[in-house]
Image: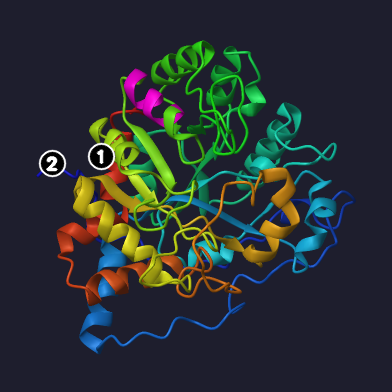
Amino acid sequence: MADRADLTGPKDSRIDEPYTAYAYLGSEAGLSTIALSPEFGRVPPLQDELTDQERTRAQRLLDESLVISFHDHPVRFPLNMGETPEHYRAGRQYTAYAGLAASGMNIVFDNMMDGTACVTGRAPWRWDDVIADLGHRLADLAHQDRVVAIRSIADIDRVYLSGQVGIVFGLEGAMPIENEIDRLDILFGLGIRQLGIAYSDANALGCGLNETTDGGLTSFGRRAVRRMNQLGLAIDVSHSSDRTALDACEHSERPVFITHAGARSVWNTPRMKPDDVLRAVAATGGVIGMSAAPHTTISTSHPRHSIESVMDHLLYCIDLVGIDHVAFGPDTLYGDHVEMHKVFGPLLGIGQRGQAPPYEPVPYVDGLENPTENFTNISRWLVKHGFSDDDSRAVLGGNIYRALKMVWPN
């Protein structure tokens, strides 16, 4: 069994009054006046059948383990998701500080507006929009001390011991760099620490999930993989085509990641990953994060999407590649995620990824609906299903931590 290199022990449990996003601006013009979704209580809590002893053990695991979400959007979307494009015109997302304080997470990989960044127009992925988004988020973080930006392993260690929450900024696709490889250095210099090769559509690096012809990594893409290795920029193939993912694993000298997906053998859609891709990522030393975005990680055993569906993918991946290569990247947010897919589907290529097996649509994923509740319910599920403390700590964050030490600067 590989050394999981997870941090354990008591965390600082102090609780301060949470900061409100952009409070430093007061009531100045430029802030959105659109009503935002709540950080608590938008949907009913998961009903479980744990004993008091199991519940106590699950909370202890959450309190004493390094907990990392490999992919979430810990920001408040508009209460009316249809108002999101207008809301984004101000170039700001609103970090859910109170929700993060109650989440049990130490570190969350935050991919910002990503393909929804339509600040200056109606098309996503513009370079200027991405930089504006990142700059606004960093400016806001600088005005409080409970949530901090993470750029190194040492930062993770400090956040864990201090009881703060750390945000790792990343991008789900490399479209904004166009064909300028030095933009990778600029993104890294500005604090980006994880980058997807491609999203739905092909770009200068390689193919995304929607392409009918899978050409894999381009020559420029191979150069970009090398540059990302040199920088210490984590490579994500969650939305890349199968051939592109396999090529990235072949050409990378450092671990490659699937931050948020699932197993195609469990649910046969292009958004899920086939066994050869899952094995290839694990062979690099990488980690596979289980997603919970609505109507993605469903299973034939649980076709009504819930935490049970997601865990079917977890168990399959454990059997396939071993427990040292799995984790969680729930891909949740504060707001109506199902409606968000409808609003941004045309921009993100959602619905163009082939036919899915029959399933029952849900208004939300029970048990994994938002970043506040995710890891409490994950920890409880692991306890209820007989995972040891060591194995639980591995999938809660220890596996990601170990792999990042092979990628990032210390």
Residue matched to label 1: 402
Task: Report the magenta residues as a range.
Answer: 244-251
Spot occupied by residue 81 in the image (x, y as percentages of width and height): 75, 63
Residue sticking out furthest to the left: 1
Foreground label between 2 and 1: 2
State whether residue 201 is above or below residue 292.
Answer: above
212 and 137: which is toward the camera: 212
Callout 2 amino acid: Ala
Q: Is mark 2 on a helix, strand or loop?
A: loop
Left or right: where 60 falls relative to 233: left
- The quarter of the image holding the N terminus is top left
Residue sticking out furthest to the right: 29
Give the main secondary structure of the magenta stretch.
helix
Pointers 2 and 1 in contact (C-beta within 8 Å): yes
Residue found at x 64% / y 41%: 114
Residue matched to label 2: 2
